[in-house]
Amino acid sequence: MNYAMALDYQNCINCQACEVACKQENGVQLGAEKQRIWVGIVEGVVFGRPFINTYPSQCNHCIDAPCVTVCPTRASHYTKGGVVQVNPRQCILCKACLEACPYDARFIDDTRVAIDKCTFCDHRTAETGTTACQATCPTKVRTFGDLDDENSDIVKLLKTRRFFFQKEFSKTLPKLFYILPEDEGFARQSVAHNTTVYTWEDIKPVYEQAGKKRSKEWRR
Amino acid sequence: MRIEISRRRFLQKSVALMVLGSTPFAGVKLLADTKNPGKVAMSRQVPTLCEMCVNKCAAIAHVRDGIVKKLEPNPLFPKSRNMLCARGTAGIHALYDPDRLKYPLLRVGKRGDGRYRKVTWEEAYAYINDKLTRILDEEQDNRSCIGYCAGEGLAEHTFKTFMYDKFGSSNFLNHSTICLQTAVSGFALTIGNYGLADLENARYVIMAGANRAEAIITPDTMDLFKRTRGRGAKLVVIDPRYTSTAMHADTYLAIKPGTDLAFVLALTYVAMHGQLYNTAYVENNFQDFEKYRTHILDSQYTPEWAEKITGIPAASICKIAREFMAAAPQAIYYQGRRTAWAKNDFQLRRAMALFTAMGGGVDVIGGIVFGSRLPLGEHPANAPLYANARQRIDKDAAAVIGATGSWVAWRDMVAEGRTPYPIRGMFVYKQNPMLSVPDSTKTREMFEKMDLVVVIDTMPSDTAMLADVILPECTYLEREDPVQSFAGIEPAIALRRKVVEPMYETRPAIDIMRGLAQTLSKPLWEITRKYDEDVQEEIEANSEEEAYSDGGFDLVEPFIHSQEEINRDMVVSKHGEDAWRLLREKGVYYPGMASLFKKIDNNTYQCYPRNKKIYSVLEKEGPDDQGSDAQRSCPTCDPCMNPADFTPWKRTFATPSRKIECYLGSMETKGIDPMPKWKDEYNIRVPAGKFTFITGRHAQFTQTATQNNVMLLDLMRENYVWINDREAQDRGIALGDLVEIESSVGTVRIKAFPTPKILPQIIFYIHGFGSTSEAMTLAHRNGASDNQIIEGTIEPVFGSAVMHETLVTVRKVRA
């Protein structure tokens, strides 16, 4: 099993339903800075015309996750399906993972006195098939699923669309698949010119191999 | 010690456990109990309907140990399309809000100083009874001396049944005239109904002022934004601000506030001048089109003319008109909701309806459709006649004053002492006029003139702080509300079921009304007997008992049964027992649901298959050689028939002429322009140094009702004032600086947000902040209230509040 998420980010209306659903589902600490997931916003003006791009985001559950490697106490670890988790009882708040994470996906939970982060809602996906953020989303930006399952919603979607990753230069094999918009104008507006765009054929062997290599760790 | 409880035993004791389980507020940590797997979880899932805004999306409440832990979308409800927005999910914190109204309260201090005494329900009712009988005695049974207002909601009608049908006052106010009265009536008087926009199939949508990404309307929001950006629906956004809706637009154009009418008239001109409209549809379905055409062309509403007024380039206007008509009839000038913006708002909505209709986009797939509604049984009340109850005070405030009056005009008359008879008191249900009606200072003056103010609410709002008596209603998760049938392309009935027992001493509206009725019925009858000559005659002719009960003076009668019993009767009488069982179990019912509803994938569900969706409902008359009788009554049911084939057919619209009305003769007699027309007075010149103030909504809060919600405050702590970045720079205003905004009616202080996303000479901040109620500990003085500075002006047709014509000055206070 290799859990991942695809994001059809062009649907996003920045309503932040996902943020609230995440907090409610997972009992995330209150406070604007305490977020397991968020809607990233880039806005500006080009030739006098304003624009806004939204990139809903969360932990990428990278296959080569630097937060796991850097952790001195193994508090950061993999669980089934390659989900990156933090065991709060082992966390000593050294904050090395905060520095190591290319996506700024971690924060300090003052109530657990430990690092907190997205868990891909692992307590519910077996039952519902969806994370809280996916289930609640009005415009259905997110699709969660198993990359190893040819019949999962996510693989079906990735087979029909092209996609890219955020901060791919970190070489961590991230698992948030951003779906490339079909509209050329919007794609040009929201995807950096040097971004690599993939198809499922391109990426499948790479992720499959990397996943296989790690699968023992994922089951530990 | 842990006690194992079997499921059955739990059910027996559920009431006691729920009371125990529901008292504590879990502090700031909201842990879903995923640990403790050994513990026997007492979890339930209860379908309900959200009340965090007006959409009423279907939700499933997950209850564990008597505490609501999570609200999830209920995919069965076609209207809400398997989603719950930020507010919907945060509904739990309306239930567990630490500042909730918990007990009936009586004022002990001066009005507005917030000092109250906890009393029992009986004491509260007795106090109201005492005051009310004295007032009615003095007013000789003129029931209309007590005004009342209600916010939108499923139980609004329960309150109105008591105040209007039973108590008998004509002075009712609701959200209409501070909301969508002009839009609804503009469309209804033109095409017969406000209608629904079929955004699942529209190919071209003009959204002017409407902001569906931030002001979420279901299913419009979900349907539209899955189809923008080259996926079937071209979107044109016209707004003085660059909104989250504008970021999805193919074309975004900034417009000067209050000039939308000129824009639509110019679009109409282009379509008429070039004969781009659907001539067959117009020929068959328009009344007085020739008059309208002559008027538009003779008035020279050219794109060049409109450019000067609106600021939108003439070339863009031409292009939009052409593209719109090319995509028609799957083209919609989106109706929008909201308040009236300018004095010409009614004419604007008429022009919008006529423009859409000229393309043929009314009562067709992808256009404005009317949908269908599943029937429900009735719950009638025997309404008594009071001979001394007088007509509403504001009946002449505008050309057409309906049953919901004109909030601003009514308020002004009371505040300024200009009423034909004294208004002595007010009952407020679920509305917060102190923050929702323009010119708050005047609203306060109105309340201060009254001898009895009763507020029924869940939160100690600014309005509640002016009440003599506060009656705490329970939140929507603690009550069953009247069942509702939702009209649409995919009609359904949905039910708000009680999820947990009411906390503290709160009660649902129906119980409050029952209690009030039981206390008031006989004492008020005595007053009617004393002053009402008709009743006196009736008593002489028959008996007192007969006059009282047959005449409907027994106020308790509509509230005898529980809400659940009433709902059951309303559903079973039309759809049978099985439907009722299904509705209670699933929260949603429509005929054939069990076989039609399908899961397609984790994101997509089908409620109705395409050939069962109801797009075209009006009776049609095609050429004799086309279509069978069955196709005429419901042509979309026939998958073999191309919708384009029957688009231009003659239809029977729900208007007086049975056609689309270009010319409203009935309005002309009331001094209202019979056709949309631009007048010089609509040109508002903003003097140098001044700004037009505009207001709006966003997706994280609903009006003023959710401002104390701890979860939503995480998303936005306070509102900021938008000001054009260049103008801000000239004035030395930077992000976060405190500025003072002053209009002729008030002054506020608020932090600045300089941005290129707004036109110069306009400032904006969102509605719903700036509570001054100290009892709202989380919302108290967050940002500023828009209605503190908006002037109380009304438009001439319905007396709707005009929200975008206030001129203000901006001054930097400190960095």
Image (cartoon, coloured by chain):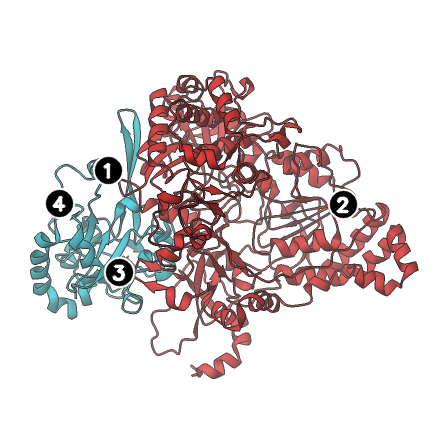
- Which residue is the site of mark 3? A120
Chain bearing tag 1 is A
Question: In the image, is residue B274 above or below residue A202?
Answer: above
The amino acid beneath tag 3 is: Phe
In this rendering, position of residue B497 left or right of residue A11: right
The furthest residue to the right: B540
Looking at the rendered structure, the secondary structure element under dot 3 is: loop
Looking at the rendered structure, the secondary structure element under dot 2 is: helix
Crowd band around label 3 with a 10 angstrom C-alpha radius: few (<14), some (14–19), many (20+)? many
Crowd band around label 2 with a 10 angstrom C-alpha radius: few (<14), some (14–19), many (20+)? many
Q: Earlier in the sequence, mark 1 or mark 4?
A: 1
- Which residue is the site of mark 1? A186
Quarter of the picture containing the C terminus of chain B is: top left
Chain bearing tag 2 is B
Q: Residue at x 25, y 59 (%)?
A: A144
The amino acid beneath tag 1 is: Phe
Query: What chain is colored cyan?
Result: A
In this rendering, position of residue A87 left or right of residue B443: left
Q: Are marks 2 and 4 in contact (CB under 8 Å)?
A: no
Q: Is residue B302 visible?
A: yes
Which label was assigned to residue B144? 2
Which label was assigned to residue A116? none
Same chain for mark 3 and mark 2? The answer is no
The amino acid beneath tag 2 is: Ser
Q: Quadrant of residue B395?
A: top right
Q: CA distance from mark 1 to mark 2?
A: 58 Å
Chain bearing tag 3 is A
Q: CA distance from mark 3 to mark 2?
A: 59 Å
Which label was assigned to residue A197? 4
